[in-house]
Amino acid sequence: MHAVDIIILAAYFIAMLAVGFYFKQRQEGLDEYFVGGREMTARHIGLSVVATDVGGGFSIGLGGLGFVLGLSASWLLFSGLVGAWLSAVFLVPRVKALGTAHHHRSFPDFLAYRYGEPTRLVAALVSAIGYAGFTGSQLLAGGKLAAAAFRFDLTTAVLVMSVVIVVYTALGGLQAVVYTDTAQWAILFVGLIGLAIPLGWIAVGGAHGLKSSLPPEFFSLDNVTGLQFATWMSTIVPIWFVAMTLYQRIHASRDAATARRAWFVAGLLEYPAMAFMGATLGLFARVLYPTADPEMGLPLLIRDVLPIGVTGLVLAAYFAAIMSTADSCLLASVGNIIDDIVGRHVAPATSERTLLRLSRVLTLVVGFGSVGFALYVPRVIDSILLAYSFMVAGLFFPTLGALWWRRASGMAAFWSIVGGGGITVVLTLADINSIDPVFFGLAVSAVVLFLLSLWFPATRKFDG
């Protein structure tokens, strides 16, 4: 890589660390660190939501799917549109109202209000572990990009990315994350539309080059199996109802109307905007590097095709996407541990000042610990779906019960989370290559919730 591109990237990383340090100086408690002071606008929240959900993992992962499937890979993010709009209508108003009334900061806060403290504890454990794994997937995406750009080996590249992302998040908390997400999304969008796509189009020889190099099914939208589409929908749509990162942003919004507008905007930016851009870049990479690892094709395209200076800008765009997701997921995992486990069960008398300092230390511990997960799962898209499956299988149906079924009880929710998440982990470790384990996990969770709620129904009434 040319020195100009290295300087651009270095300046970007230094700027992110400076932002983190700036917000560190302004924070006095956990509200600022985890929910940004509760006064953020729809513009900042909407861009932060889509930057967090799509991010580098889905950007690199979607490019890899485009490499393998063509334009049909875009269906991956259609699930994001569906999830965003459904949750905007059915979830956001109720969660925001309860959060304002009861000063909630987290997803387990919502479940604890409905089901009690044992459910909070198990939900926090599942969410914390899942988001630590998801953070690892983003570090892997960043490592693959850095490995191609700087010709590092993958392990070194993951470690380099980890230092910047983890330290910046530990300093700044959610305020730094949301405000920089706005800038990071702008960089990513301009970098892809204005630079990577037109220059990639030229490099592959335009429409003629694409059609002469790729089979016809790469240009259709039906080059994906029904089972694969169902797996994406079953794994990704429910995450919009159980994602700690999204609950933090609901509580960070000024009001419910602000949050709903943000969710509608985020859905449209995911599909069709990012969906087709990512799939198209995957097509370009397939033409130029037909024998490459599918998820390395896009980083190679950026490194080799773009001119000096432009390479640094587009790489900064992708690093921005990776950071915008990694920092949010890392903060969600730490929030579950500090707010819902330590602050409620381990040391409830601890002052907010002490918890804030502990949050920063734990951000470093969890962040660097997730590096192991990043190196264990070789494909970005696999690591994302694995983390999603673990959370969705256990948490989705108890969340639906909390929203709409008054008979759903704390005992039923507790064992529904344990059963759904547990069977998903067991089947994943058993490596049964038939039906995705998330389907079995969801089924077990639903059955347990239903039967135990019939036998041991809720005994208290809930407002809201």
Image (cartoon, rainbow, N blue to C red):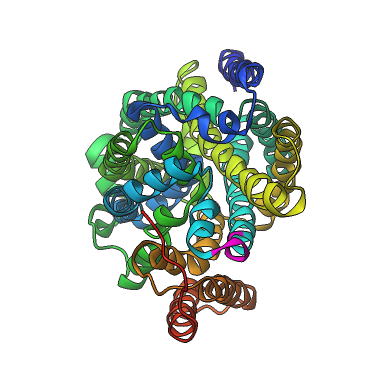
Which residue is found at the position 50% from the left and 24% from the top?
Answer: 180
- Count of number-bearing discs: 0
Which residue is found at the position 32% from the left and 23% from the top?
Answer: 194
For the N terminus, the image quarter is: top right
Magenta highlight on residue 205: no
Residue sitting nearer the eye, 66 or 259:
259
Main secondary structure type of the part rendered in magenta: helix
Point out the stretch of residues depicted in magenta.
116-120
**Does any portion of residue 289 appear in the rendered image?**
no
Which residue is found at the position 67% from the left and 34% from the top?
Answer: 166
Residue 393: x, y in percent?
49, 69
Residue sitting nearer the eye, 11 or 343:
343
260 w.r.t. 342: above or below: above
**Does any portion of residue 159 appear in the rendered image?**
yes
Residue 185: x, y in percent?
41, 29
Residue sitting nearer the eye, 419 or 351:
351
98 w.r.t. 277: above or below: below
Residue sitting nearer the eye, 418 or 66:
418
In this picture, residue 258 sits left or right of residue 146: left
User: On the image, which quarter does residue 143 sit in?
Assistant: top right
Residue 123: x, y in percent?
58, 61
In this picture, residue 371 sits left or right of residue 444: right
In this picture, residue 379 sits left or right of residue 98: right
Residue 357: x, y in percent?
75, 31
